[in-house]
Image: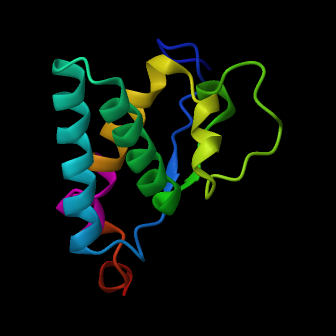
């Protein structure tokens, strides 16, 4: 069954086991750099901010549903490679960023912790 976006409701998957507070701060800085470069019409700044965000995404994303990708995307993508994110549909990239934030929320983290399952 498809949802309102024409997908089967599949969601991206993440692994935050190697993400530190330092990494979280860097991700926030990249988002701020992206907004600032956009406001300043700074193309070099945009390229640097996008590259930084893709590098950080490559460290946490383990799966993105096929429905979130452009039709021409290869069947197999290695999400640990920043260039793989070039195949995410433009309208889904902000959904991916939101999903990362939700996946790191305290409720989700506590629910998925080893202590919660014992």
Asked whether residue 104 is drawn in magenta, I would say yes
Q: Is residue 52 left or right of residue 35?
A: right
Q: Is residue 40 left or right of residue 114?
A: left
| Quadrant in which residue 112 is drawn | bottom left
Question: Which residue is depicted at the point 35% across and 71% down?
Answer: 19
Q: Looking at the image, is 115 positioned above or below residue 98?
A: below
Q: In the image, residue 70 lies at what x, y percent?
A: 67, 21
Magenta-colored stretch includes residue 112: no
> In the visual, does 77 lie left or right of 49?
right
Q: Which residues are magenta?
A: 102-109
Magenta segment main secondary structure: helix
Where, quadrant-wise, is the C terminus in this rendering? bottom left
Q: Quadrant of the N terminus?
A: top right
Vertical side of 23 occupied by 80: above or below: above
Task: Identify which residue, 50 or 28, lies in the foreground.
Answer: 50
Q: Residue at x 28, y 58 (%)?
A: 104
Q: Residue at x 63, y 52 (%)?
A: 79
Q: What residue is drawn where x is 41% and y is 34%?
A: 47
Residue 24 placed where, x, y %? 24, 62
- Furthest-right residue in view? 75
As drawn, 36 above or below 1: below
Is residue 39 found left or right of 23 in the rendered image?
left
Residue 85 % position (x, y)? 57, 38
């Amino acid at each position: 069954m498809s949802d309102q976006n024409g997908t089967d409701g599949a969601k991206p998957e993440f692994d935050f086991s190697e993400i530190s507070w330092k990494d979280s701060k860097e991700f926030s800085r990249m988002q701020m750099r992206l907004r600032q470069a956009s406001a300043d019409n700074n193309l070099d700044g945009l390229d640097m901010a996008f590259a930084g965000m893709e590098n950080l995404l490559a460290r946490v994303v383990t799966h993105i549903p096929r429905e979130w990708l452009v039709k021409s995307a290869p069947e197999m993508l290695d999400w640990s490679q920043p260039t793989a994110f070039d195949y995410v549909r433009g309208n889904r990239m902000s959904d991916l960023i939101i999903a990362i934030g939700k996946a790191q929320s305290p409720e989700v983290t506590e629910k998925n912790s080893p202590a919660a399952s014992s």
